[in-house]
Amino acid sequence: MNESLTRQLSRLVDQISTIVVGKRAQIEDAVACLLAGGHLLIEDVPGVGKTTLAHALSVSLGLDFRRVQFTADLMPSDLIGVSVFERAKDAFVFHQGPVFAQVLLADEINRAGPKTQSALLEAMEEQQVSVENETRALPQPFFVIATQNPSDQLGTYPLPESQLDRFLLRITLGYPDRQAERELLSGGDRRIAAQQLQPVLRPEELVLAQQQVLEVRVADTLLDYLQTLIAATRSGQWFREGISPRAGIAVLRAAKARALMAGRDYVAPDDVQAILPQAIAHRLVPVSGAGRGPVEQVRAMIEATPIP
């Protein structure tokens, strides 16, 4: 295991924690999501640091960052780009949209209409976009961080299940505790501070780290444990419908990323347990009468499942 990389990843989390105060666990999840090559959904009320986290993460990794405010009238061309006729060249020239970035912050994603959601879905899944019968590759790495307001707020659309399934993890920041909020109140503007951060990892080092995630070992007994958890989601005891094989693969990738961050070259049951609620709760609906939300239901399922 590369100890230098482990120290760099720890420094990365430490640095972002100076900007997004009191949310180390959520920052670790965000970094694990990026290392696993997935996309991140942050669901919470406005003003708790969702945008600041995305900005601090991109600056700390030296990645090209773009932010798009999703609204009801946002069109796919506003996201992807458009061809404009240039008289000097006597031809149509394609002008790239904000999706051609390494980190795309889709702010308030559930305020946009279905057509725009569909355009973003292709970018997330295929790492490319289709414009005027031409396919254009997106930069690498390509990472979408989407923020979502609670569904009971005005002007929001529920995200389709197919799009929710493209997010590797969903996290919630929540309100800061008293000590963290005091630090925020007595400190300066966190967004300005985020702009002044120095990169901890270069983009090419991040790509190498993502490749190392794939090399993390998984024992057969660990796979047995994961399959037992997957089967539990499909048993009908906990959820209406279970997770798909793609979701199971996502859990394993995220668990490998957590192991790498911890300096291990193998996945432990703790890695799976720590990442499972964030990786599958947004894909599941608890059975009627459960009396718990999806995250709490996943945690109860973990408690009831024996470790091999």
Image (cartoon, rainbow, N blue to C red):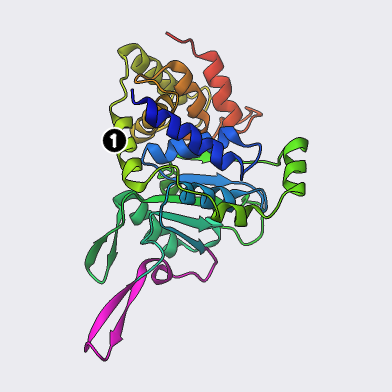
Q: Quadrant of the N terminus?
A: top left
| Quadrant of the rendered image containing residue 90 | bottom left
The image quadrant that residue 93 belongs to is bottom left
Residue pictured at 51% horizontal, 25% vertical: 274
Residue depicted at 39% across the width and 42% down the height: 38
Residue 158, horizontal then vertical, whole percent? 54, 53
Q: Nearer the viewer, residue 182 or 259?
A: 182
> Magenta includes 227?
no
Q: Is residue 234 above or below residue 184?
A: above
Q: Is residue 171 left or right of residue 5?
A: right
Residue at left offset 41%, top offset 52%: 63
Task: Name which residue type carries label 1.
Answer: Gln
- Could you say whether the residue bearing mark 1 is in a helix, strand or loop? helix
Question: Pointer 1: what residue?
Answer: 211
Residue 171: where, in percent of width, then height? 55, 39
The one nearer the camera, 279 or 91, is 91
Q: Which residue is drawn at 54% across and 57% down?
A: 107
As displayed, is residue 82 above or below residue 101? below
Image location of residue 188, percent across then percent down: 70, 53
Q: Tell me residue 266's x, y (percent).
A: 35, 19
What residue span does the magenta drawing correspond to? 69-95
Q: Is residue 120 visible?
A: yes
